[in-house]
Amino acid sequence: GPLGSGILMAPKTFWVNEGKHAKFRCYVMGKPEPEIEWHWEGRPLLPDRRRLMYRDRDGGFVLKVLYCQAKDRGLYVCAARNSAGQTLSAVQLHVKEP
């Protein structure tokens, strides 16, 4: 089926304790298979030692931020696109310091 119209819904809020892991999951249906990009604060995110990106068994796209620090807070967006359109989902991450 088609993806959404690209309208960004109000972001969900996610709290994580400092030093714990945050996990964001973006589930996208679509033909052809959508391409996914993760963004943080408007910038494309690349995988690194603390940011894992993978697909789970259900086909969801997962971004895991390990050992969250205060500097990881901000707006995370999952942007999925295919020839039918683009859809965005957003999560605002807050880090609770001890």
Image: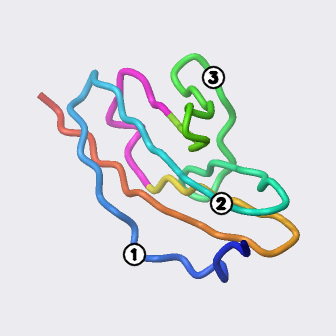
Give the percent coordinates (x, y) of residue 17: 20, 32
Residue depicted at x 48% and y 31%: 64
Q: Amino acid at mark 2?
A: Met
Residues at circles 3 and 2 in contact by the CB criterion of under 8 Å: no
Query: Dot 1, how many residues are within 10 Å of its Cα: few (below 14), some (14-19), or many (20+)?
Result: few
Residue at horizontal 69%, vertical 48%? 44
* Element assignment for label 3: loop
Task: Say which residue label 1 marks.
Answer: 10
Question: Splitting the image into 4 quarters, where does residue 86 fall?
Answer: bottom right
Q: Earlier in the sequence, mark 2 or mark 1?
A: 1
Q: Amino acid at mark 3?
A: Asp
Residue stretch in magenta:
64-74
Which marked residue is nearer to the observer: mark 2 or mark 1?
2
Which comes sooner in the sequence, label 3 or label 2?
A: 2
Amino acid type, mark 1: Ala
Separation (CA) of disc 2 from disc 1: 20 Å
Give SS at disc 2: loop
Callout 1: helix, strand or loop? loop
Residue 46 colored in magenta in the image: no
Q: In the figure, is residue 90 to the left or right of 60?
A: left
- Image depth: mark 1 or mark 3 in front: 1
User: Which residue matches tag 2?
Assistant: 29
Of all residues, the one furthest to the top in this rendering is 49
Q: How would you rate the neighbour count of disc 2 (Cα within 10 Å): few for under 14, some for 14-19, many for 20 or more?
A: few
The residue labelled by disc 3 is 48
Q: Report how far apart the C-alphas of labels 1 and 3 lie in the structure.
A: 28 Å
